[in-house]
Amino acid sequence: MLKRCRILFVFGTRPELIKLQSIWDALQHSPLHDQVEVYFTGQHQDLVDYQQARKIPFPLHLPKQGVKRGLSLNALLSQFLQDLDYQLERLNPEIVIIQGDTTSAVAGALASFHRQIPVAHVEAGLRTPSIQEPFPEEANRRLISQLASMHFAPTSQAEQNLLDEGISPQDILVTGNTGVDHILQHTDSSEALTTADHEVMRKLEVAMTPQKRMVLMTLHRRENMNHLESLLETLAALVTKYPQYHFVWPRHPNPTIMKTSSEQLGGHAQFTLLPFVSHALCLNLLQRAALVMTDSGGLQEEAITWGKPLLVMRQHTDRPEGLTQGAPVYMPQECEDVEGGFVANTMQILEQLLQELPPAQEISRDVYGDGTAGQRIAKALGRMLTCV
């Protein structure tokens, strides 16, 4: 008979919620199904779809107090550590599972380490050459790798990054990316669209004509905020030469993004600026897009899996597999002059793509995963936690 082996998942953002779902689905049908509990830090309390969160098939625990707006990274981390310490003492898990590189993830790893609770890291081993890009995520994941006991690496490149840092091979399992599980399980994203989503699509169809091709665009990284105004101003001038394209931007609710995007692109006939949208709607837009331009890590995975031409609006990517495995991925060259050189290089690549857009490829199951990462992780947890 198994004794209790409580597993605690810690998440705080919408991408974490999405990327943990396939693991939860697999655990639901495993002998560990009654050992799992979930803690939500509240980091994305305005962005997490609570309807989706309520569908988590395990007990869900919430913080004692909500997260205040505008907290510094240090203040946010401090609050998470305090709340997590209380939860870890109360729940006493045998292992804590975290995903990715957020402040919630690093707090989960550090709080668990302080209480000598083993940590398993989902999406481990992603790296860029600079600890400042992306900020603070690159530093977060490097720190998590030093604290974790088990590393679920999405690709062989991520595994190699961990080996290069001295992580033992026996503590690494290459699983594929759980985000790909979600994409391949929701190939018909229209089924999950809400009434509000359908209203957005109706308005978008009015703005789009049959002759226009859609470009899906997102920007939210801190390293792009310093030159956001210059980037958008240059973009607005460039696209007028290519009226056959219409740009759709579901915007992160960051005040700087909302204000600057409205000032630079509001009223521009070739842009539809959307508020923050559901992930189902974002996937629906992705399926319709002829080109994707983004600084998001998750959208890189999604676009490459769907075979969409992709312009990565960053100097360094933590997901280089698309570049090395022949996917239609384009990036500006690294340059010291970010304000001028990066913007100019990015717009030069975009203009080349708008002049002659490469065709979309078939759905890929071999760059970031085959859709079974969650099952592999659930089986590994079963092997780790078989307590007799």
Image (cartoon, helix red, strand yellow):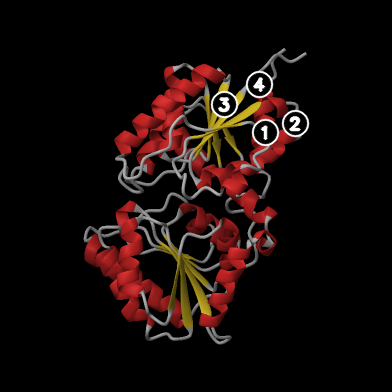
The kind of residue on which mark 1 rests is Ala
Q: CA distance from mark 3 to mark 2?
A: 23 Å
Q: Secondary structure at mark 2?
A: loop
Q: Residues within 10 Å of mark 2 (few under 14, many from 20)?
A: some
Q: Which residue is mark 2?
A: 30
Q: Is 302 positioned to the left or the right of 312 in the image?
A: right
Q: Which residue is mark 4?
A: 385
Residues tagged 3 and 1 counted as in contact (Cβ below 8 A) = no
Q: Is 376 positioned to the left or the right of 226 in the image?
A: right
Q: Is 27 positioned to the left or the right of 299 in the image?
A: right
Q: Which residue is mark 1?
A: 378
Residues tagged 3 and 2 counted as in contact (Cβ below 8 A) = no
The kind of residue on which mark 3 rests is Gln
| Image height of 196 relative to 55, above or below | below
What is the quadrant of residue 386 in the picture? top right
User: Which mark, residue 170?
Assistant: 3
Q: CA distance from mark 1 to mark 2?
A: 8 Å
- Report x, y in % for residue 372: 68, 45
